[in-house]
Image (spheres, helix red, strand yellow):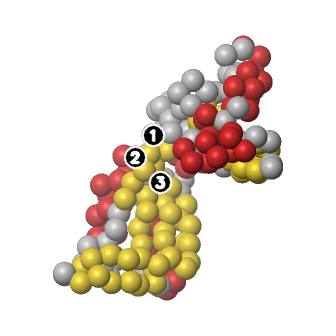
Amino acid sequence: MATNLCCRALVSSTTRFQLVGAVSTLSSSSYSSYYLKTGCAQSLPFVRLLRSKFSTQTPDKTVRAVKMEANSNTVPSIVVYVTVPNREAGRKLAGSIVKEKLAACVNIVPGVESVYEWEGKINTDPEELLIIKTRQSLLPALTEHVNANHEYDVPEVIALPIDGGSPQYLEWLKNSTRD
């Protein structure tokens, strides 16, 4: 009996390769029950084949990520998450952030539901998520701006590093924000 297994991503310590939507058919029920019980896609028989076909060890197939190191075209950059109670508050805060050149771009993502504990009580509230792209060096000023212009007592301000990306976009991010 054949079992289909869909893989979202394969990542190992030796190979950084993303495989989206691949389907493998395991014809042996002993294979399928073992691999599905362990939940380890790395153990599947086809992984060795993928490593041999897509290894980054050969010079002509080397894949390099654009590193976020300060140079003349880019600066170390971050993505910052901030939640807001509604669209109006999100637009107002996003507009002031971009106007002050504290970020190059702010995405407003509707339909977020947050579950959290506040003052000893579990709450569930609809919110919108701001995804803010900016320079790492602007995080203190951005945090101060959010705290001063947000209606929450303790607004969420969480920063994640941008390890790489489109050189043109990262250069635009640098040029669209203040020093």
Q: Is residue 60 left or right of residue 144?
A: right
Name the residue type under label 3: Val
Q: Which residue is mark 3?
A: 79
Q: Is residue 14 left or right of residue 138?
A: right
The residue under the point 48% across, 69% down is 130
Q: CA distance from mark 3 to mark 2?
A: 9 Å
Q: Position of residue 35 (x, y in %)?
A: 62, 42
The residue under the point 47% across, 54% down is 79
Vertical side of 82 occupied by 102: above or below: above
Give the image quarter of residue 49.
top right
| Mark toward the viewer: 3 or 1 | 3
Q: Position of residue 155 (x, y in %)?
A: 31, 72
Q: Position of residue 70 (x, y in %)?
A: 46, 32
Q: Which residue is mark 2?
A: 136
Name the residue type under label 1: Pro
Name the residue type under label 2: Gln
Residue 115 can be seen in this image:
yes
Give SS at disc 3: strand
Neighbour tally class for label 2: few under 14, some 14-19, many 20 plus, Cα within 10 Å: some
Give the numbered dot on residue 76.
Answer: 1
| Mark toward the viewer: 3 or 2 | 3
